[in-house]
Every structure is written in C-alpha cells, then in structure tokens.
Amino acid sequence: MALEILSVLVTAAAALDLLINRLGVRILHDRWNNAQLMTLSRVGTLGRNLAAVTGVSALLILLLRVLSQPSRTWNAWFLRTALASFAAVFVPTTLLATILPAERTTVYVVIFGAGAAHVLTALLALRAGILGDSPRHVRIATQLFLLVALTGLLSIFVAVVEHDPYSTLGGRSMWLALRRLGEVAYLALPIVLTFGVWSTLRPPRHRLQWALVVIVTLLFTLAYVVCLRSSPAAFPVLLYGAQHFELFTESMPLLYAFPLSFGLGGAAASLSAGDPLLRERGMSALLLLSAGYAPRAPVQLLMLVLAAAFLVHSSLRPAE
C-alpha cells in the first residue's frame, strides 16, 4: 500500500517539475514579471523536492524487493552486490544535490551522480534479465532500458574526455552516433510498453484501453502541432528543456510527436486498466517521459532510475 501511495505522489510531483521548472518558466519568462516568476519558481521547487523525497522512498522499497530475490548463480550475486553498492552512492548524492543550493553543487557532483544513475539503471535492466520469466514486451523494454542507460553513460564519458565533443571530428561523430542510438531506444521504450496493453488484457477490456490510447495520442499530437506552429523558433528550446532531444529539434521536431504522444497514451491506458502489473509499467513509462533522455539534473536522474525499478519490479510480481 505504501508503494502505491508513493508512486502516485512521485508521478504527480515529477509532472509538476516538468510542467513548471522545465516548461512553464521558459514559456512565461517574457510574459510575467519577476514577482510572478518567483512565485511560480517556489511552486516548482516544492514539486522538485517532493519528487526527490517520495522518489527516493519508493526507490528504496523497490530496490529492497529486487535485492531480496535469491541469487542462485554467480552472475546474479554479482549484480545484486553491484546494485546495492551503486544505490548506496546514488541515493544520498541525489538527495544532497536536490536539497543543497545550486551554487554549492559542483560540476563533478553532477557528473558523478549522472554516471551512477545510468550504471544503476543498466544494472536493474540486467537484473530483470536474470530474474523471473517476463512477457516478451517487458524483456524488450528492459533491453531498451539497458541501451538507453549505456548510451547515456557513454555520452557522458565522451563529453568528459573530450571536454567539448564537437571540437574534434572523432568526438563529434561518436557523440552523434551515441545520441542517435540512445534517442531511438528512448522513444521506442514507451511504444513497446504500450503494445503490451493489447497482449496483457483480454477482450473487451483491451478495446476500451486502446480507444483511450488513440484518444490521448490524437489530443497530445494536436497540442504538439499547435505549439510547434504557434512558436516555431522557441519550440526547439522547449523540447530540449522537456526531453533533452538534440538530433531533430531544429530540423524536424515534428518527428518526436507520435512516439511521445503514443507513449503517453499507452501510459494512461496502463494506469487505468486495473491490472497491477500494467499499472507499474505505465508508471515506468510516465516516469521515463518525465526524466527525458540522458538527463543531468538530480531529480530527473532519480526518475530515470525509478522508471527502470518499476519495470523490473513488475517483472518479478508473478513470482511473488
């Protein structure tokens, strides 16, 4: 029961952080005065802190359940130990980086936290491959999570080693290759989870949920296109702030409309399906979309790890 309450709170707080801190402040920067922006910023800070506290609490519960599974092989024991070790590093680092003022957070702390988060996400995906017998779409989703985590980690490594990955031809080529692969895997992940709605539910319930997928997809796509047409110059900045996309934000931002809207529709259908496994997978998709690809901010990194943890936990549920 505690996990269900925390999952609702952390999802609402993550949505608040996305809508206010990463979108609202940018949109209203030139329209509101300083006093109004400060009030909005305080509300956004409240959402960010709530997401950090509830997210860490939910993550600890999920990690304890994943780590409590028996390790019958050497690989499983190694992954279990590595998960516990990186979680012990990531959780306090995230809390400190969120609570402390921005001027007291160094670049090295941010890089260290981002690296630990992506490693922890990769370990969770590997752990899911060892434990339980999951449906095919869950196995594919965990493999995509592994790819998202590894490409994000490698892109951080390239940025640190090269300092400026665009300064040399080799660094630029490697950076672009990692970004392309990682963004494709990130966009494919919620789509795969959405198709899981059809394979999990039985008629006629799955038709109702797919009708919800279509409705949410059409509405979000329409809103996306309207925002793009109304402010084409500012839209790439908003898209980067919300999702950290780089490849097609300037040239073809419309390409991102369908994967995002379809994934959001699948998450809404999963959350309203009444199935506990689908609910956790829908929570995973929503948290992933709120984190964005290859995030750097502590709360967004927490959402990335939490999305992987919910997906892994849903793959263990049949065995519990």
Image (cartoon, rainbow, N blue to C red):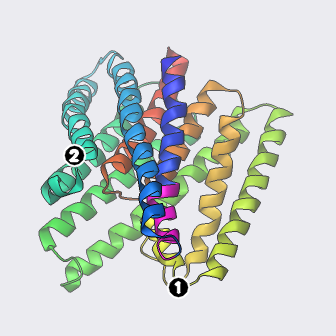
313 sits left or right of 259 in the view:
left
Tell me the SS state at disc 2: loop
Observer-nearest of 190 and 130: 190
Q: Is residue 228 visible?
A: yes
Outermost front residue = 35
The residue located at (51%, 63%) in the rendering is 24
Q: Main secondary structure of the magenta part?
A: helix
Q: Position of residue 148 (x, y in %)?
A: 39, 54
Is 127 above or below relative to 237?
A: above
Is 129 above or below relative to 230?
A: above
Q: Position of residue 318 (x, y in %)?
A: 55, 19
Q: Position of residue 93 (x, y in %)?
A: 20, 41
Observer-nearest of 4 and 118: 4
Q: Which residue is mark 1?
A: 233
User: The magenta stretch spans which residues?
Assistant: 19-30
- Reply yes or no: does residue 21 show up in magenta: yes
Which residue type does callout 1 highlight?
Answer: Ala
**How far apart are the two marked residues, 1 and 2, measured between alpha carbons?**
34 Å
The tally of labels here is 2
The residue located at (72%, 32%) in the rendering is 273
Neighbourhood count class around disc 2 (C-alpha, 10 Å): few under 14, some 14–19, many 20 upward: few
Q: Which residue is mark 2?
A: 100
Judged by depth in the image, the label closer to the viewer, 1 or 2, is: 2
Neighbourhood count class around disc 1 (C-alpha, 10 Å): few under 14, some 14–19, many 20 upward: few
Tell me the SS state at disc 1: loop
The residue located at (63%, 44%) in the rendering is 267
Which residue type does callout 2 highlight?
Answer: Leu
The residue located at (23%, 28%) in the rendering is 84
- Reply yes or no: does residue 270 show up in magenta: no
Is 49 above or below relative to 78?
A: below
Q: Position of residue 111 (x, y in %)?
A: 19, 56
308 sits left or right of 228 in the view:
left
